[in-house]
Amino acid sequence: MNSVGANCNELKQEYDACFNVWFSTQFLKGNNSERMCAPLFKEYTECVKEAIKEQKIDMKEIEKNVLNTEEEQKKPTGQR
Amino acid sequence: MVKFYESSTVFQYNWHQVAQAFWQRYPNPHSSHVLSEDTVFREVRDNKLFTKRLLTKTNRVPKWGERFINNPKVGIIEESVVDPKTRTLTTYTRNVGYTKVMSVVEKVVYRESDDNPNCTIAVRSGWVDSQVFGFKHAIQAFGVERFRKNCQQMILGFNHVLSHLYPKHGQHETNVSSEKSSVQEAKDKLKSAAKRASDLVMPKANVMVASCQD
């Protein structure tokens, strides 16, 4: 899958590959250390942040957290 | 008033498989509308994995909607929490930009089935809203129709990725037939949903709960 920044594609692929291994062999098995992919993640997300800025996507909206906050949408009462 | 809908899907794979496949969902043959996918935030906290991803998707709108939306691309923020202890993956997605025209929020909870640990249940809730005076209902109805369509694409795409990641899956024999029929069924549903969307001229003001199963 492509990154939003064409120049970040390679970094993304490297990081994603690392993450998928980490997720199945470490995280799901109870090892929570994030060290394994940290350097790749840093480089990749820095690249993405630049791309987001260039494409004028609202960074504030991206930074906002909604899940598990007051702002999260609620199911209407009386309906399932 | 915000339109709400809910649907549930059973995946014939265990929760660990579904959780792993979740990160590898794109691209798949049913995701041509997804243009890019990036992880912008990730950390482990309280033994849970918190992630935020930015997706960009094509934003095809009906002719009458072009006056409100002229950007062919829309940004989607996907927040997620993976809790291996409770075997729950929760995702929450919302669009960035154009939220006054149409805001679409979706929450999906993937949980191990209580009846069968080899199956995973995904419960999907959606909220569609619009603040455009005079077009609110039409836009909401359009949003719900698109949800139905995307819902089938999501299921087809996810199953496609799962079957590639886990070809020697425990219940392979029984799954082949059921998968085939469900794919055909889903295709038919997709067709009729697409037809409904393209036929959409009048707002369906009374659609309160739309299910991707119907």
Image (cartoon, rainbow, N blue to C red):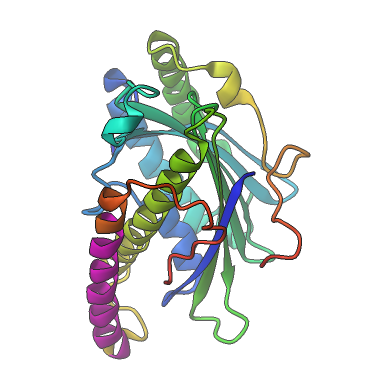
Q: Nearer the viewer, residue B210 or B205?
A: B205
**Residue at figure coordinates x 44%, y 66% from the top left:** B17
Figure disc tally: 0
Q: Residue at x 43, y 47 (%)?
A: B203
Q: Which residues are magenta?
A: B174-194
User: Residue lying furthest bottom in this view?
Assistant: B174
The residue located at (50%, 42%) in the rendering is B137
Residue B140 is left or right of residue B114, and the answer is left
Quadrant of the snapshot with the C terminus of chain A: bottom right
Q: Is residue B153 visible?
A: yes
Q: x, y (%) of residue B53?
A: 49, 36
- Could you tell me residue B37's position as x and y percent? 38, 35
**Front residue of B86 and B71:** B71
Q: Tell me if residue B76 comes above or below residue B14 in the rendering.
A: above
Overall secondary structure of the magenta section: helix
Q: Position of residue A55 (x, y in %)?
A: 38, 13
Looking at the picture, does residue B156 appear above or below residue A45? below
Where residue B119 sits in the image (x, y, percent)?
A: 49, 78
Q: Quadrant of the N terminus of chain A?
A: top left
Who's the residue at 39% across and 40% down the image?
A16
Residue sitting nearer the eye, A3 or B204: B204
Left or right: B6 as drawn, with respect to B167: right
Q: Is residue B204 highlighted in magenta?
A: no
Can you say whether A71 is above or below B202 in the image? Answer: above
Is residue B124 visible in the rendered image? The answer is no
